[in-house]
Image (spheres, helix red, strand yellow):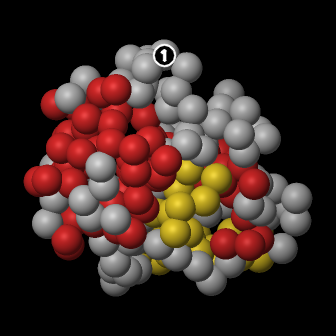
Amino acid sequence: MRITTTVDGTSYTDEVEPRMLLVQYLRERLGKVGTVVGCDTSNCGACTVHLDGQSVKSCSVLAVQADGREITTIEGLADDGELHPLQQAFHDNHALQCGFCTPGMIMQALDLLKENPDPDEDEVRSGLEGNLCRCTGYQNIVKAVRAAAEQMPSAARQADVPQEPVTASMPSEVSQS
């Protein structure tokens, strides 16, 4: 099947197998390796991306379902080499250990902050409950989200604002080494 999608502001047209997962498409075809595969069952949230501005677990979405839609990955949050305020808050508050869950946590936290710009600790924990971290007790993650909420202007919460797409065609097969 042929799909066209916009990922992090760039438009891509590609041939995909009907059963290819969005996470596979992002990683294997587009090289968006910040979107990680954690469990393949949609339990951990490590693969969370934004699809038309809403967080989704990309291991539970088919690539064909993204046809004609806008996707934002963790790589799409930084602006001209400058970390997104939420990424910076995770760094400043030591909200990661191994870092494996961090991209999904940040993407889900951004969705949470769009809906609730000033969450208390319980609301942050509730908003992130579908994302698992195997290394921490979540305290610094909660601290980072709350710190970002205090620092982020409302425009930064809208990281999925459509940009003028750049068109790129990807080969239907990518050699793997």
Measured from the top left, where is residue 99 in percent x and y?
A: 42, 25
Measured from the top left, where is residue 136 in percent x and y?
A: 44, 18
Q: Quadrant of the N terminus?
A: bottom right
The answer, for residue 83, to whether it is visible in the render is: no
| Residue located 65% across and 45% down the image | 28
Q: Quadrant of the C terminus?
A: top right
| Residue located 67% across and 72% down the image | 66
Measured from the top left, where is residue 120 in percent x and y?
A: 30, 49
As rendered, which of 9 and 105 lies closer to the eye?
105
What residue is disc 1 on?
135
Find residue 2 and report its image quarter.
bottom right
Measured from the top left, where is residue 114 in percent x and y?
A: 35, 68
Query: Is 50 positioned to the left or the right of 76 in the image?
Result: right
| Residue located 48% across and 16% down the image | 135
Query: Is 177 positioned to the left or the right of 163 in the image?
Result: right
As rendered, which of 170 and 1 lies closer to the eye?
1
Q: Amino acid at mark 1?
A: Cys
Q: Is residue 2 above or below residue 63?
A: below
Query: Is 149 positioned to the left or the right of 46 in the image?
Result: left
Find residue 116 and report its image quarter.
bottom left
Q: Is residue 109 above or below residue 6?
A: above
User: Number of numbered discs present?
Assistant: 1
SS for dot 1: loop
The answer, for residue 45, to whether it is visible in the render is: yes
As rendered, which of 129 and 106 lies closer to the eye?
129
Disc 1 residue crowd, few under 14, some 14–19, many 20+, Cα 10 Å: few
| Residue located 25% across and 38% down the image | 144
Query: Is 11 positioned to the left or the right of 164 in the image?
Result: right
